[in-house]
Structure formats: structure tokens, C-alpha cells
């Protein structure tokens, strides 16, 4: 038995790999796993702990390090970039313009090709991050109002990128649905647009 992604599973079922090739895949000592995330829109609102940022150079900066930011592709669509560190400040998950790579000594990585979520968990590294994308059809009235606050035309596509979970470094921080908690402080209810840094922690 071998675990494969949806693309390689279909290829294996159709006979693309021999049994020996599949066996060699199982025995390979891979140091990392990588793939790509497909969500791209021209308007992306970053939602983190009841705080919202739009068109900022860095969406989330923690301890002076950019953790979440968006970069435009050739079609002028936003692509997601991430830097996630463990307690020793080793980068264990990184994404650049929707292409991601993670160390394999983690508990779980969920990145279904057809889904709108990305989940990264590692108990030993004290990291538990969830990213969820919602397009305009899925936004509730409050989120629609926030989109309007940022001046995004109602006839244009917009996506909200929700970031929740916890990480130990550069600063220990928890990202809840309604607030961000760090060092005995709480951050919530802010709106940032067109600035250098949207949400800054520590």
C-alpha cells in the first residue's frame, strides 16, 4: 500500500508506474514535501483574529518577520506567500507565490487540490495553522460590508483569506477567530489598507 496525491493516484491506477517504481517511492528518504495552492484573485482581503488587511505590503508581520504576504502574478492576481517557524526559529513551512514546501517531520499537512483550505500541524514544533479561502458567494453580510469598506467593487471577484491557529516563533502567538493573543495582549477589530504592514505582532 502507498499513499499518493489525487494526481499521482489516478496515474498509478492507469498503470503509469511499475510496482518497482512504486516501491522505490515508498523507500525514498524525502526531507520535504511540496505542492501548489490554486487560489488566485485580483482582490484578496486578509482576515486574522477579527482584524482585516487589504493591499498591504505585508499582511501579517510577527516579531519583525513577514509571516503572510501576497504577491501579484503575471495576471495581476494575488498569490499567497508564508513563512512558518518552529520554536528554534527553523523555517518548517514556506510558500512563495502559492508554491509551498514543508519539512516532513510534521503531524499533518492537508492541502486538497480541489479544496479551499490549507492545514499544517506539528505538535513537536508547537505549530497548528489553518488557512481558509472564501469567495464572494460565501461571505456573510459583515464580510460583504468589510469588502465594501475597502472599496472593492461589488461586481468584481474578491476572496477572503482567513488565518487561524498558533505558532511559537518569532513570537508565541495565537490567532483565534475573533482576536490575536500574544504576551498577555489582545488585538482585534482593526482595518488596514494600502499600508506597508497590515497586522503587526510583537
Image (cartoon, rainbow, N blue to C red):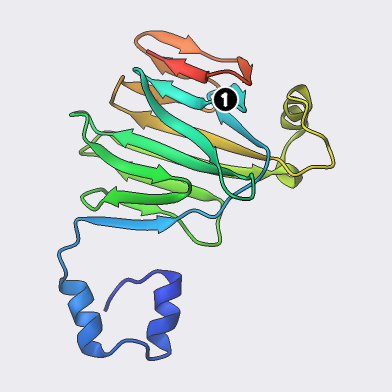
Q: Which residue is mark 1?
A: 56
82, 131: nearer the viewer: 82
Quarter of the figure with residue 36 = bottom left
Is disc 1 placed on a helix, strand or loop? loop
What is the x, y in percent for residue 195?
A: 58, 18
Q: Quadrant of residue 194?
A: top right
> For this view, does 131 lie left or right of residue 167?
right
Residue that sits furthest to the top in the current view: 184
Check the image and report above or below for 108 versus 90: below
The residue depicted at 78 percent of the width and 26 percent of the height is 151
Residue at position x 24%, y 89% from top?
19
Considering depth in this image, is 196 or 165 the residue closer to the camera?
A: 196
Q: Residue furthest right?
A: 155
Pick the quarter of the image with the C terminus: top left
Residue 120: quarter of image:
top left
100 with respect to 30 (left or right): right
* Front residue (pair 17, 180): 17
**Where is residue 128 shown, x and y percent of the image?**
36, 37
Residue in the foreground of this view, choosing between 34 and 131 = 34
Decide: few, some or many residues near mark 1? Use Cα within 10 Å; few <14, some 14-19, many ≥20. Answer: some
Image coordinates for residue 134, horizontal then vertical, percent: 64, 43
In the image, taking residue 157 as reference, residue 22 lies left or right, namely left
At horizontal 51% and vertical 19% (from top left) the residue drawn is: 197
Amino acid at each position: 500500500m502507498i499513499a499518493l496525491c489525487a494526481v499521482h493516484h489516478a496515474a498509478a491506477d492507469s498503470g503509469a508506474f511499475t510496482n518497482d517504481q512504486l516501491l522505490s517511492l515508498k523507500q525514498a528518504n524525502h526531507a520535504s514535501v511540496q505542492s501548489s495552492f490554486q487560489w488566485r484573485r485580483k482582490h484578496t482581503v486578509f482576515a486574522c483574529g477579527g482584524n482585516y488587511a487589504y493591499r498591504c505590503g505585508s499582511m501579517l508581520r510577527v516579531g519583525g518577520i513577514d509571516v503572510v504576504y501576497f504577491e501579484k502574478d503575471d495576471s495581476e492576481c494575488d498569490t499567497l506567500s508564508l513563512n512558518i517557524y518552529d520554536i528554534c526559529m527553523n523555517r518548517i513551512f514556506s510558500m512563495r507565490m502559492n508554491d509551498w514546501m514543508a519539512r516532513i517531520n510534521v503531524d499533518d499537512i492537508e492541502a486538497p487540490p480541489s479544496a479551499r483550505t490549507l492545514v499544517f500541524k506539528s505538535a513537536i514544533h508547537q505549530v497548528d495553522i489553518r488557512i481558509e479561502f472564501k469567495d464572494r458567494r460565501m461571505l456573510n453580510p459583515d464580510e460583504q460590508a468589510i469588502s465594501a469598506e475597502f472599496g472593492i467593487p461589488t461586481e468584481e471577484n474578491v476572496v477572503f483569506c482567513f488565518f487561524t491557529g498558533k505558532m511559537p516563533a518569532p513570537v508565541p502567538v495565537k490567532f483565534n477567530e475573533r482576536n490575536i493573543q500574544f504576551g498577555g495582549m489582545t488585538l482585534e477589530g482593526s482595518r488596514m489598507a494600502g499600508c506597508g504592514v497590515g497586522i503587526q505582532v510583537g
